[in-house]
Image (cartoon, rainbow, N blue to C red):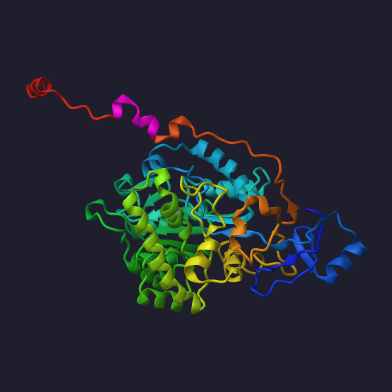
């Protein structure tokens, strides 16, 4: 029971895509939206309310849904740090700290599709139990990879689990790993359909064949679990869609054949331009090679141009930020994807808001229950000091977020969250400074001596 709140005077953007309505009341009772407009005011008059919020001059809209986060990663600057310098218990505590920041940024729901160990499910449950304050979560486990790995090259072991990855070799291992993850509570299975092969020195290549992808989708679907795929080239998007993947991340450089597959199968899309956009704009600050910055920008432009066709054909688009890396720190960039959709895909601010609210409910597997301000829906509500339809970037300004309400409960936005330092042992640069990690050439004399041993 979370009591009742009457919000009056605000302009309501309900998340369905219908036009904004000025001076409309919204009534929240016991975690749900129970009335709108005149009916809300009348109900409050008759039955009373615990709290009232005057939203005059402000916008009232659904809480944002970020369909691509990594709350357990600890903002690494690279794969070495992420795979070799994290411990399970510390990462759990850090992700609980992170969850609060996400909620305060106006994000009331997230899909955290792959995580270190099984922290995602545990964090989701801790939030649901009221132990940790954070957004509503849907979680995956360790991302499924073939022996070719994902984006971390040879840091991924040939089998078993490393960091956020689990290598599945052969059909039986695949099926069993999916069953194991479901046993421990995942909502989604994540697969890395493309990976970087060091010897090929090029962009990511498809590392699964379609039969393997079908095995993953069929096994997960039989157990009422959805599949999300990381696809950084055209063939991977095409095959993922054909195999029955439910949600596709990135979909980079997709060609017309891949778009056809997406449109035909109805796979939802979460391109996650924010990570690439931040890398292009600020990558130098986290050590990204300067020659890569234009590559990232080109990937956004080429991909967005193609995805515009899928959007026009009615494919469902979700917003995702890939929050959790050094270039996408927690609580900061969740709403940039709306700006990217407007700038690169030609969406109207209203369409971008629908992507970030109503469509996001798909990632939460709550399509009939979440993401819009309609009678009976879960009461996840933001009050914004300004008009996101005039400039959608306003949602990125935390000082414009006047209220965050999750399941009918107002979130404290004023008590400061203490700043945190990065633990020294989690930093690669600490280890790089250690003399043992520097290359030490043997002298001629030493080599001579060793050759006689
Ligand atoms: Zn990701």
Camera sees residue 148: yes
**On the rendered structure, is 84 left or right of 422?**
left
Q: Quadrant of residue 17?
A: bottom right
314 vs 211: above or below: below
Q: Main secondary structure of the magenta part?
A: helix
Query: Where does residue 146 sit, x and y in percent of width and height?
Result: 33, 56
Judge by depth and name the residue closer to the eye, 353 or 27.
353
**On the rendered structure, is 430 left or right of 15?**
left
Q: Quadrant of residue 414?
A: top right
Q: Residue furthest front?
A: 390
Query: Where does residue 360 sit, x and y in percent of width and height?
Result: 58, 64
Residue at position x 27%, y 29% in the image: 438
Indicate which quadrant contains ligand 1: bottom left
248 vs 137: above or below: below
296 vs 449: above or below: below
Q: Quadrant of residue 10?
A: bottom right
Q: Which residues are magenta?
A: 429-437
């Amino acid at each position: 029971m979370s009591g009742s709140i009457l919000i009056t005077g605000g302009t309501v953007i309900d998340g369905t895509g219908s036009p904004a309505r000025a001076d409309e009341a919204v009534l929240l009772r016991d975690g749900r939206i129970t009335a709108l407009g005149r009916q809300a005011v009348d109900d409050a008059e008759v039955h009373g309310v615990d709290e009232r919020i005057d939203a005059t001059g402000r916008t009232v809209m659904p809480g944002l849904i970020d369909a691509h986060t990594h709350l357990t990663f600890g903002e690494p600057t690279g794969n070495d740090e992420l795979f070799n310098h994290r411990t399970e218990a510390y990462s759990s505590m850090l992700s609980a700290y992170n969850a609060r920041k996400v909620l305060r940024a106006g994000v009331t729901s997230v899909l955290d599709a792959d995580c270190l160990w099984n922290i995602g499910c545990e964090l989701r449950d801790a939030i649901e139990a009221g132990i940790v304050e954070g957004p509503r979560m849907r979680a995956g486990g360790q991302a499924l990879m073939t022996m070719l790995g994902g984006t971390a090259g040879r840091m991924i072991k040939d089998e078993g689990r490393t960091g956020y990855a689990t290598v599945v070799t052969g059909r039986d291992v695949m099926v069993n790993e999916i069953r194991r993850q479901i046993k421990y509570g995942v909502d989604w299975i994540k697969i890395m359909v493309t990976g970087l092969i060091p010897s090929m020195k090029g962009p990511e290549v498809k590392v699964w064949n379609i039969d393997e992808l079908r095995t993953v989708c069929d096994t997960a679907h039989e157990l009422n679990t959805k599949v999300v795929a990381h696809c950084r080239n055209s063939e991977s998007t095409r095959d993922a869609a054909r195999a029955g993947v439910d949600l596709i991340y990135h979909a980079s450089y997709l060609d017309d054949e891949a778009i056809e597959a997406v449109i035909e199968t109805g796979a939802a899309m979460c391109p996650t331009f924010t990570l690439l956009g931040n890398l292009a704009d600020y990558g130098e600050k986290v050590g990204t090679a300067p020659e890569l910055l234009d590559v990232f920008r080109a990937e956004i432009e080429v991909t967005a141009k193609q995805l515009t066709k899928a959007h026009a054909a009615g494919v469902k688009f979700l917003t995702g930020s890939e929050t959790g890396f050094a270039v996408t720190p927690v609580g900061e960039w969740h709403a940039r994807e709306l700006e990217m959709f407007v700038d690169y895909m030609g969406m109207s601010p209203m369409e971008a808001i629908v992507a970030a609210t109503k469509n996001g409910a798909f990632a939460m597997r709550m399509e009939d229950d979440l993401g819009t301000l309609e009678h009976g829906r879960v009461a996840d509500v933001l009050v914004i000091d300004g008009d996101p339809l005039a400039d959608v970037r306003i949602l990125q300004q935390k000082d414009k977020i006047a209220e965050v309400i999750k399941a009918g409960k107002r979130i404290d936005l004023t008590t400061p969250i203490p700043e945190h330092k990065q633990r020294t042992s989690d930093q690669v640069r600490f280890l790089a400074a250690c003399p043992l990690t520097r290359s030490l050439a043997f002298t001629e004399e030493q080599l001579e001596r060793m050759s006689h041993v």
